Structure formats: C-alpha cells, structure tokens
Image (cartoon, rainbow, N blue to C red):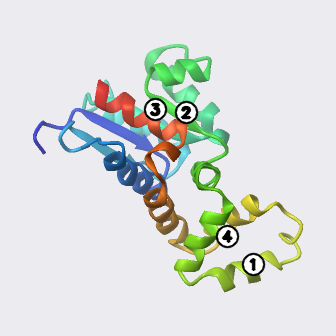
C-alpha cells in the first residue's frame, strides 16, 4: 500500500466484497493506493458493530458502504446513531453508503443481461444444474432473472464465485450505478 489505510468500505458479505474488489480496477481505481480496504461485515445486522469498530468511535477510518434494498432501513438507522438523522437514500449517499436494487446479484444480472449471465453459468459447467433448478415447481413460473438470483444462492460458495465472475465480465459502461458511485466516492475522498 502506498498510503496508510484511510477508508473502510463496509459491505454485507463476501460476494459484495469480491464484486467491489473486482470492479475497482475496471474503473481505474487502485484501492490499495488510495488506502481503501473492503470489509465484509457478515450480515446487515452487524452494521452497527462495524460502524463502531471502523468509524469515529473505533479506528477512525473514513467509511463508505453498500447494502441491499431490504437492508436499507437497518443501515440508515445505524448511520443515524453515529452521524445524526439519516432520513433518505440521498442522506446515505452523502455519507458514502449506496443501495443495490434489489441486491448485488440483481444489479449484476440487469447490467449484463440474462443471456450473458447464462453464458457465464454455462462456462462454469452449471447450465444443466440451472435448468434442473428451473424445473422445480416453486421456480418454474418465475421470471428468469429471479431464477438466476436464487440459483446463485442455492449452493455454498456459489454466490461468492458468481459475484466475481459476473463483475469480471462487465464492460466499464455496464458497471451498476451503486457500485460505480461507491467506488468513485471512496477514491475522490
């Protein structure tokens, strides 16, 4: 690292961490050179503890983060406890925290398109497994993007692996907005 650690990006899990670390170089950002570390906190419910450990009450790092839509309220509440009222998504973004709609996998699937995602699944020799999953009664009538999102979470480690694979497949102009804004925020200071 050319600078000391100055910023911690707090993300929910390892898949988010892998995606952020994969996309940074694509966008021309050297996280090490900017003193940035990506921290997978383990679950959105741990955001308060992570803010305490890494923020002004802990190590004093500048903070940023990423969460899923379903976790926005929990993140907003924890941020409010540290910095005062954080009432809107814009307030969160001003602090450097961004929201994926619906979640990271949804962002990546929408950015690439289902055909390209299926090509990645096929390259991983899992297209047959995915087709079997699609035939399960609970998923048969669901939209293809929903099926892909759920498939990625059906086997231990698959979600983490696909986060890197899908992020690594993106072109610079396809990077989902929350991830692009997060990385731009942390390198601009």
- Indicate whether 181 appears above or below 155: above
Q: Is residue 67 above or below residue 128?
A: above
- Label 1 and label 2: CA atoms lie apart by 33 Å
Front position in the image: 167 or 182: 167
Tell us which disc is closer to us: 3 or 4.
3
The residue labelled by disc 4 is 151
| Cα gap from disc 4 to disc 1, whole angstroms | 7 Å
Whole-percent x and y of residue 158?
A: 54, 71
Of the residues under marks 4 and 1, which one precedes in the sequence? 1
Which numbered disc, 3 or 1, marks the residue that appears first in the sequence?
1
- Residue 181 is labelled as 3
- Identify which residue is drawn at 68% across, 85% down: 128
Which marked residue is nearer to the observer: mark 2 or mark 4? 4
Horizontal relation, residue 121 to residue 10: left or right: right
Label pair 1/2, CB-CB below 8 angstroms? no
Residue holding disc 2:
75
- Residue 117 x %, y %: 61, 65
Q: Label 1 belongs to which residue?
A: 133
Vertical placement of 43 versus 184: above or below?
Answer: below
Whether label 3 touches label 2, CB < 8 Å: no
* Mark 2 vs mark 4, CA separation in Å: 26 Å
* Label 3 close to label 4 by CB (< 8 Å): no
Residue name at image x 74 percent, y 65 percent: 147
The residues tagged by marks 3 and 2 sit, at their Cα atoms, a distance apart of: 17 Å
Q: Secondary structure at mark 4?
A: helix
């Amino acid at each position: 690292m050319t600078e000391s650690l100055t910023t911690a990006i707090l993300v929910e899990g390892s898949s988010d961490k892998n995606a952020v670390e994969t996309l940074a170089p694509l966008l021309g950002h050297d996280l090490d050179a900017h003193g940035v570390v990506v921290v997978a906190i383990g679950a959105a419910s741990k955001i308060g503890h992570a803010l305490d450990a890494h923020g002004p009450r802990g190590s004093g790092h500048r903070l940023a983060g990423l969460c899923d839509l379903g976790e926005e309220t929990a993140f907003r509440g924890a941020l409010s406890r540290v910095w005062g009222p954080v009432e809107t998504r814009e307030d969160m973004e001003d602090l450097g925290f961004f929201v994926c709609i619906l979640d990271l996998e949804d962002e990546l699937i929408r950015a690439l398109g289902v055909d390209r995602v299926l090509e990645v699944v096929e390259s991983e020799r899992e297209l047959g497994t995915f087709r079997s999953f699609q035939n399960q009664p609970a998923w048969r009538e669901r939209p293809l993007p929903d099926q892909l999102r759920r498939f990625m979470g059906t086997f231990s480690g698959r979600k983490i692996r696909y986060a890197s694979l899908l992020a690594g497949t993106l072109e610079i102009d396809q990077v989902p907005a929350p991830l692009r804004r997060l990385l731009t925020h942390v390198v601009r200071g």
